[in-house]
Every structure is written in C-alpha cells, then in structure tokens.
Image (cartoon, grey):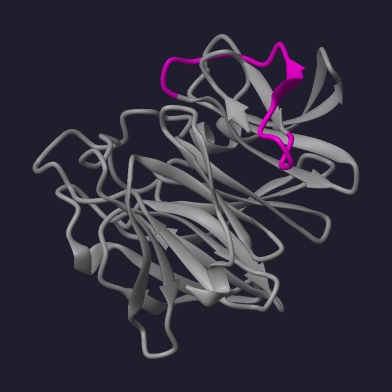
Amino acid sequence: MPEGQRGWITRIDLRNGKATTFARGLPRAQFGGAIDVAFVGSTAYVLVTLVAPDHVVGIYRVDDRNSFTVIADLGAFSETHLPPYPVDVPTGLQYALQPISGGFLVTDGHHNRVLRATLSGEVTEVVAFGNVVPTGLAVSHGTVYMGEAGPVPHAPATGRVTSFDLNAPTPVEVASGFPLIVDVEFDRYGNLYALSQGDSPGDVPPASPAAANSGKLLRVNADGTFSVLVDRLDLPTSLDFAGDTAFVVTLNGEVWRIKHVSKL
C-alpha cells in the first residue's frame, strides 16, 4: 500500500492485519507522492505523482528497501505533450498503474488520458478523453476497463466504467449510475467490480474527496447497471482481491476486508 506523504510502501499481512514497511525513501508529497504500486513477477514498481520540479514524476522500480530506479519519466512526457486545453499541473496527476505485456498503463486524471510506458522507459499516449477524470484500471483478455470519476460536481451519470481495446482504443460505456468511480477490479471468477468514493459534496475544487461515509462497493451488471454490495465506506480510494475477499483502502490509510464478495 503506497503512503505518499511518507514516501513509503507498506506491506499488510492478510492473516493478521499487521503493517510493516516494504520500502521507504520515495519522493513525498502532501497530495500525491507514491500513489499506486504494482508487481511484475517479484519486482515492485511504484507510480509517483505531484512531486515535480524537485523529483521525477513517473514509474519507479523498487531495487531494495531503500533504493529505487526511475524507469519511465511520465512528467517529462506530459510537459512536452500537453492536452489541447489549459492545465494547472503540466506534469499531470497520474492515478493508477496497471501492468501489461512489456510495461504498464497509467491513467492521468488531470490530463484526461491513458499512457503506456515500456520497461525501457518509452512513453506514449494510448487514448485521450474529454473531462471524464480517468481513475482505476483493470485488464481482462486484452480489454482495458477503466473507472471515471467524472467532472465536478460529480453526478451519478458521469461516474462510469468504460472499456477499450489497446489495438483500437475507442471507449465504450460498460456501466454508469454512481458518482466518483475511483477503481475497478475483477475477482477470481471474472466478475467485475467498481468502487464509488461516494456522494459529491457539491461544486467543490477538482480532486476534492467525496462526502464522508458515502462510499460503495459495486458489482458491474451485464445490463449496464451497478448493484450495491457494501455501503457507508468512508472515502475509499482503491480496491483489490485475494480469492473471494475484497480489500478496500481508504483515504485515511485504513484497509478494510470484505469476505465472500461473490455471494453478496
């Protein structure tokens, strides 16, 4: 679990909930820093954002507990390939890191696009959007599934899950109807889930969190709707599965375990 303010990656023992430090010394930021982590084999890679100009915005490989190597400079690419509208942060606000063959996909919720970064450091744009605020990613059988938080104020209709093919990246709506979708994930049975951070607090500045205790774990249905499985989650930010158990990380650093999700 990344902790951006500390510059740490924390490991959680799923048996007893004990937290230990997996790696430390990453660039820190009050809002940003280490924001996502993914493994390729036994090697961990960390997505770091909002740390320019003092540090590289990009993907860091964890070499050992206290050392890292930048493998992709996403900030430099973003600064030289700005979207066709004014932005507040030229280096972008990257959100999710998803391994694919030969590298990673990365969402940028500020520049409204998905980037591809190879393990050798080449960065390209896969697809760009309007003001949808792309968030979490999941991949199944070559299809990319993506959460969309939607523009401010966050309306249920603009909280969506979309999909696209990497070879023909034209987004298609999969489901909509809940605001601030911040992550998507498959369970071991192939069911797709989404995480809504919750109700919009109104016409607030971009990147403001949802109202407290209004988050929801959702199942994505084949008819384009969502089913609410768990509600009253307090500011959830990411979702993952181990078997039939869901783990939800919250903005305040808590990790919640939800068992037997496929039976809910």
Which quadrant of the figure has residue 230? bottom left
Q: In the image, is 2 to the left or to the right of 171?
A: right
Residue 7 on image: x %, y %: 62, 16
User: Which SS does the magenta portion mostly show?
Assistant: loop
For image coordinates 37% across by 77% down, the residue present is 175
Q: Which residues are magenta?
A: 13-31
Q: Whole-percent x and y of residue 181?
A: 36, 57
User: Measured along the vertical axis of the image, is residue 254 above or below residue 244?
Assistant: above
Quadrant of residue 110 within the rendered picture: top left
Q: Does residue 259 lie above or below 104 as drawn?
A: below
Compared across the picture, whether 236 is left or right of 178 comes to right
Looking at the image, which is closer to me, 77 or 92? Answer: 92
Pick out the residue farthest to the bottom. 223
* Residue depicted at 50% across the width and 54% down the height: 136
Tell me residue 23's x, y (percent).
76, 20
Q: Is residue 30 magenta?
A: yes
Residue 179 visible: yes
